[in-house]
Structure formats: structure tokens, C-alpha cells
Amino acid sequence: MSFASRVARLGATCLLAATAAAPAPAADAYPSRPVTMVIPFPPGGGADVLGRVIAQKLGETLGQPMVIDNRAGAGTLIGAAFVAKAPADGYTLLLSSGTTFTVNPAIRSSLPYDPVKSFEPIGVTGRASLVLLAHADVPVKTFGQFVDYVKAAPGKYPYGSFGSGTTSHFAGEAVLAAAGLKMTHVPYKGSAPAMTDLIGGQVPFTFDTVTAAIPQLRSGKIRAIAVTSARRSSLLPEVPTMAESGYPAIDMDTWLALMAPRGLPADVKAKLEQALASVMKDAETRSKLVAQGFEPVHVDAAGAAELIGKELPAMRALAQRAHITAD
């Protein structure tokens, strides 16, 4: 072998050795591109407004834009199913309410996702109490008076909700079960028509969110009797809980949680959890959420999983007892 050939072979050998020893190119740190947040509600609604407030700050915290994708329909099923089938890489997230994770599984025999196995909890972003409302002319001012009033005429009085199988329907049935009452449920297609009929006196009582009730309470045409949550709402601090009236079993509210497809890499999940925790501590973000009638109460990933694990069987039992079904 000539000297030139030996030099060429030696050079090639060194090049191969150097290539083998060189570290592999590092993967792009998450997130390296925009992240999509799916909101399974129509644009402009309460959940959409809240989601956009959270998304804006979350994007700033992560250092990438958050793209809002409203995939409304079928009681959040469309949006939830889309995220459940998306790659578990952290670039597709779901911001939805308890409807997706505890209500739908309680009232539907089949779902295009599993409420537990399909999703990786990132955290709960806050809660909103539900409240029992009465028309101003109804002679009821306390929850105790409400119980006595309804018990005096079983089955006579109706109550309205913003839809069959919704959280307000579940709240109504939970109250009836706990207090031993009989009332007729009148489901409306949304909070607005239910509130219109309450103000007009077509129904004497409704269950609605504190968020929807606050503007109407100022009119004086309706009255807040009690909230269904375990604690008083900071938005209606003067309104007592039903537990304070002797019914501790009544504990129901509505909440929003950030989720990802199941199988998220541990480092990506940790980054998202830390980012959400930071967002929920931000004073400006919290102020914007409160302005929308939402209580910014952060619960971490483990707490979100625990919440679903506790609430899901309770909702299923209530749906079975009250014969609530979407099928």
C-alpha cells in the first residue's frame, strides 16, 4: 500500500471515529413551535373567554403562541375526542369543564374517549359555584324556607336548568335528593332562556352559575337563595351555602381543567404543570378571570386526577337515581 493510500485510510478512520464519538443532535426543547389549545365550546361563550385569558398568559410563559381551536358540539364530545386522538407531544391541549370528564360519562352509554385513560391532567384552573335562584315574588329568602315551601306542595313547583344532563340539572337533582323534595324539572336550551323565564315569572326557581346570576341579581327581579358549593362564593359572599342550612351532602360546582392526550413525556408534562402554576399566580390573569365571574383556584395535576376520580362515581350514581340520560 502506498504512503498516500495509508494516509487516506487513516483519515477516513479518524473521521469515522470522530463521527461515532460526536453526540447526537439535541432534540428541540419543548415547545419549539405554537401550541394548540382546543376549547370545546363556541367562541364568545364564558368558557371560551376564560380559555383565551389563560391561553394568552400560558403562551407568554412557555415562549410560544397559543392557537385557540374552538371545536364545539355534542356537549364537548367533538373537541374532547379530537384531543384524545392527537399525538401526545404537548402541542395539542384541551381546556374543558367537568362536563367532559364527569357529566358525559354519567349520562352517555358510549363515548369517543375515556374520561380517565384518554387524558393527562395538567391542572384545574378554577371553579364557579352554582346557585339556587328564585323569582323576587316567591316568598322564599333562605334555603330552609325553600325546603319548607316546596315540601308543603310536593310536585307543584318546577325548577329550570340550562339543559337536560347539564351541571345545573345535576345540581337540582342533588338538592332534591338531599332535602327529600319533589319538583318538576324544566330544561332550557341554555342559561339565557332559563334566566328570561325566571325574571318573567314563568318558573319560580332555577339553578344556574354564579357567573350568569350576578348581572341579573342587580336588577332586583330575582333572588339568590343559596349556593351548592361547600364554601361560599367569593363573588356572592353574602349568599350562604346549603351546607350551612344543614345539608352538608350538597356540594357541587363547575370547573375548568387543562388536559393533554395520555402518554405525555414526563419533561413536557412537568413544563406544562409549572407553566400553568405560574399563570394561575399571575395577579393580572387572576383579576381578568374574576371579572368574568370565575374563581381562579389552581389545583395541580394530581389534584385534578383526584377530583375526577371522586366526582365521576358520584355523578354516575346521581344520574342513575334521577334517571338522567342523554341516550
Image (cartoon, rainbow, N blue to C red):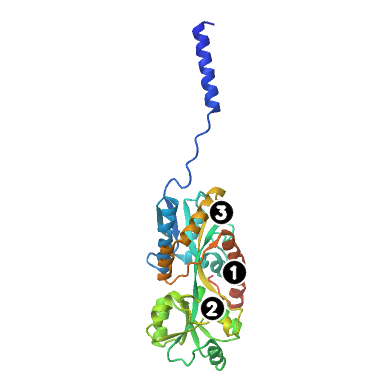
Q: How far is the residue under mark 3 from the one under mark 1?
A: 20 Å
In the image, residue 223 sits, relative to residue 64, either above or below, namely below
Amino acid type at circle 3 is: Arg
Q: Which residue is mark 3?
A: 262
Q: How many marks?
A: 3
Residue at 55% x, 60% y is 300
Q: Position of residue 91 (x, y in %)?
A: 47, 50
Amino acid type at circle 2 is: Thr
Residue closest to the far top: 2
Q: Position of residue 234 (x, y in %)?
A: 48, 75
Numbered disc in front, either 1 or 2: 2
**Dots 2, 3 in contact, CB < 8 A:** no
**Dots 3, 1 in contact, CB < 8 A:** no
Amino acid type at circle 1 is: Glu
Q: Dot 3 surroundings within 10 Å: few (below 14), some, or many (20 or more)? A: some
Residue 311 got which mark?
1
Say which quarter of the image contains residue 244: bottom right
Q: How far is the residue under mark 1 from the one under mark 2?
A: 15 Å
Return the disc, 1 or 2, that comes first in the chain's sequence: 2
In the image, residue 256 sits, relative to residue 26, either above or below, namely below
Q: Secondary structure at mark 3?
A: loop
Name the residue nearer the viewer: 40 or 139. Answer: 139
Residue 228 got which mark?
2
Task: For residue 41, say whether it is visible.
Answer: no
Q: Secondary structure at mark 2?
A: loop
Q: Dot 1 surroundings within 10 Å: few (below 14), some, or many (20 or more)? A: some
Residue at 40% x, 54% y is 67
Q: Secondary structure at mark 1?
A: helix
Task: For residue 263, say whether it is visible.
Answer: yes
Q: How far is the residue under mark 2 from the one under mark 3?
A: 32 Å
